[in-house]
Image (cartoon, rainbow, N blue to C red):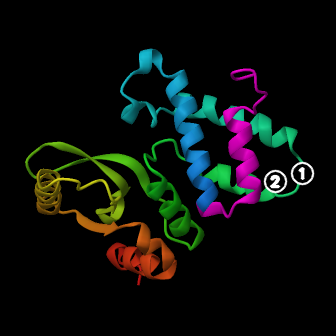
Amino acid sequence: MLDGVLVTTLARTAVDLARHLAPPRALICVDAALRRLVEQRSPLRADLRRCVHDEGLISDAASVFTGVLDYQAGWPGIRRARATVALGDPAAESPLESESRGILLLRGVPAPVVGAPVVGANGVTYWADMLWEDRRVVGECDGGMKYSSSEALIKEKLRQEELEQAGLRIVRWMFPDLRNPWRLVGRVNRALGLC
């Protein structure tokens, strides 16, 4: 009950959506729910960027989804929901990160590390939206609000320069790029040296 209204749990809501939405779009809900469950289980709301990589916390959060998936065995769309939940990652910080990762994974791009710490040439640790460590490629999802000021844009340009000087290749995309998924896949695969 929430304010006198009967509601479903966070995991149940995400699974219900995953049964009916296309997997890349459903991954937005699954990632967000996993992130919230990890956050709820993290000790004293510790550094969330690090907690979302804690295998124990992730396993606890995933078990909540397993219970819902098992309860809904045989329901319409449950196979699709299981496949989507299997791709879930609580390290994703935005809908753009989740949906674009779903698009890439479902089209055969190797799985990246999500929300990965990377060190620039200046020794500063930055956080990459996606990292293909073995290929030294960073994927950056640029939402419309990310560069709301010229100061933010300059800061991001300097960050990218530091990462490139450290030997990383950067691939950037925005929501409009999701309208042409194969073009996005091609750009990422080229950066990864896969085509």
Where residue 123 sits in the image (x, y, percent)? 11, 44
Where residue 97 sits in the image (x, y, percent)? 44, 56
The verdict on residue 82 being magenta is: no
Would you call the spot at circle 1 few (<14 residues within 10 Å), some (14-19), or many (20 or more)? few
Where residue 59 sits in the image (x, y, percent)? 61, 33
The verdict on residue 8 being magenta is: yes
Asked if the residue under mark 2 is in contact with the one under mark 1, i.e. CB atoms within 8 Å, the reply is: yes
Q: Residue at x 26, y 66 (%)?
A: 170
Q: Residue at x 69, y 37 (%)?
A: 11
Residue lying furthest front: 4
Where residue 124 sits in the image (x, y, percent)? 14, 42
CA gap, disc 1 and disc 2? 6 Å
The stretch of residues the image draws in magenta is: 1-24
Q: Residue at x 67, y 64 (%)?
A: 22
Helix, strand or loop for disc 1? loop
| Quadrant the C terminus occupies | bottom left
Residue 107 position (above or below residue 27): below
Would you call the spot at circle 2 few (<14 residues within 10 Å), some (14-19), or many (20 or more)? some
Helix, strand or loop for disc 2? helix
Residue 160 position (above or below residue 37): below
Q: Which mark is residue 23?
A: none
| Quadrant the N terminus occupies | top right
> What residue would you read off at disc 1?
75
Q: On the rendered structure, is 18 left or right of 149?
A: right
Q: On the rendered structure, is 2 left or right of 165?
A: right
Mark 2 residue type? Ile
Q: On the rendered structure, is 195 left or right of 5?
A: left
Mark 1 residue type? Trp
> What residue would you read off at disc 2?
78
Q: On the rendered structure, is 160 left or right of 70?
A: left
Residue lying furthest bottom: 195
